[in-house]
Image: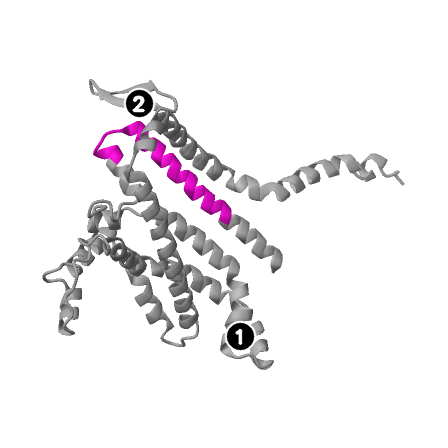
Amino acid sequence: MARPSTLAEAPPSAGAASKPAGVLDFFDRTFKYWAVLPTVIVLTLLTIQPALQLIQMSVSDVQFSGGQLQWTFVGLDNFKYLATDVVFPVALRNTLIFVVCVVVIETFLGLVLAFAVSRVGRFSPIYRAVFVTPILIPAVAIGTMWRLMYDYNFGIINQILALFGIAGPTWTGDPNLALISVMIVDIWHWTSFLFLILLAGVESLPHELSEAARVDGANEWQVYRHVLLPMMRPTIIVALMLRTILAFKVFDEIFLLTGGGPGTASQVISMHIYTVFFEQFRLGYGALLALLMALIISVFVIFYQWVNAMARKTM
């Protein structure tokens, strides 16, 4: 009887088998990073180049000459214009007032609507469609619509007030009401954005905890205060951060309703940057204002991230 070949029966070496397995294991563990790497590279390139050009513009005097841009390095000279700019402090104050007011009110209304709609039964899709409608309308249409509604002579708001014997004001022409009028439009427009984010958070909450609290004798206010709101804290912080970023960049509503006026009553930073860039053609100083605005928004984002980290530690 022939003797079997020992070479054919020999098992593969451990080193030869473990090497491919180790490589595969490495790619399995790092696949999530490789998957998003192309997107990260593209977004980084699209972000870095404009940012670097904006920084270069902020330290330069940019002029149009002979159909071309002429760049002259001026260092920090553009800060001299900032020190003598009487509009910027007013625009910064109005922007901060606008951001704080609309973000707080919209978040509160969005949270109330989210909790209310989450408890509605078969009519929930109808309510959701109604509350989401404002954010679907283009900003140009919203500005035109509300400008007609605010009109002193034939606007529907003043007509309703006239039915009660109240003389309606010039909403967008009164320095004391211009910014408030824009806030009302912004709240009507953007509350649906907060509503969508917060509704998603409410519907992801485990209902067992709230039911257990009710069984233990907690009333509805105690359930919301001590059970649901603490679990909603991370979602609320994210919604606040996103809406704060967008509120700082408000432009279309003010441009269409008041143009920053009367005077500087409703002037905000983004509107002032537009004026400096496209009406005064001071590109270097406009770039500096844009960088300052980005810095202010970054401070708020860092603050929200810190609050979110603290909230996660307490959960």
Mark 1 touching mark 2, by CB under 8 A? no
Nearest to the observer: residue 315 or residue 1: 315
* Label 2 crowd bin: few (<14), some (14–19), many (20+), radius 10 Å: many
Q: Position of residue 114 (x, y in %)?
A: 41, 67
Magenta stretch contains residue 297: yes
Q: In this orientation, which residue lies closer to the viewer: 82 or 121?
A: 82
Residue at (52, 70) in percent of width and height: 225
Q: Is residue 123 above or below residue 232?
A: below
Left or right: residue 291 compared with residue 12: left
Name the magenta segment's main secondary structure. helix
Which residues fall within the magenta stretch?
Answer: 276-303
Q: Which residue is mark 2?
A: 61
Q: Residue furthest left?
A: 153
* Three-letter residue code for mark 2: Asp
Residue 110 placed where, x, y %?
39, 63
**Residue identifier under label 1:** 222
Residue at image position (56%, 41%) is 33
86 to 163, vertically: above or below:
above
Q: Residue at x 35, y 67 (%)?
A: 128
Disc 1, SS: helix
Provide residue 66's location: percent of width, then percent of height.
20, 17
Q: Give the answer, above or below, for where 67 lies relative to 286.
A: above
Rate crowding at label 1 as few (under 14), some (14 to 19) or many (20 or more) other CA atoms within 10 Å: some
The colour scheme applied to this rendered structure is one colour
* Lower position in the chain sequence, tag 1 or tag 2: 2
Question: Residue 136: horizontal and vertical position, in percent?
Answer: 29, 57
Residue in view at x 37 percent, y 61 percent: 105
Answer left or right for 178 relative to 220. Answer: left
Q: Amino acid at mark 1?
A: Gln
Label 1 to label 2: alpha-carbon separation: 60 Å
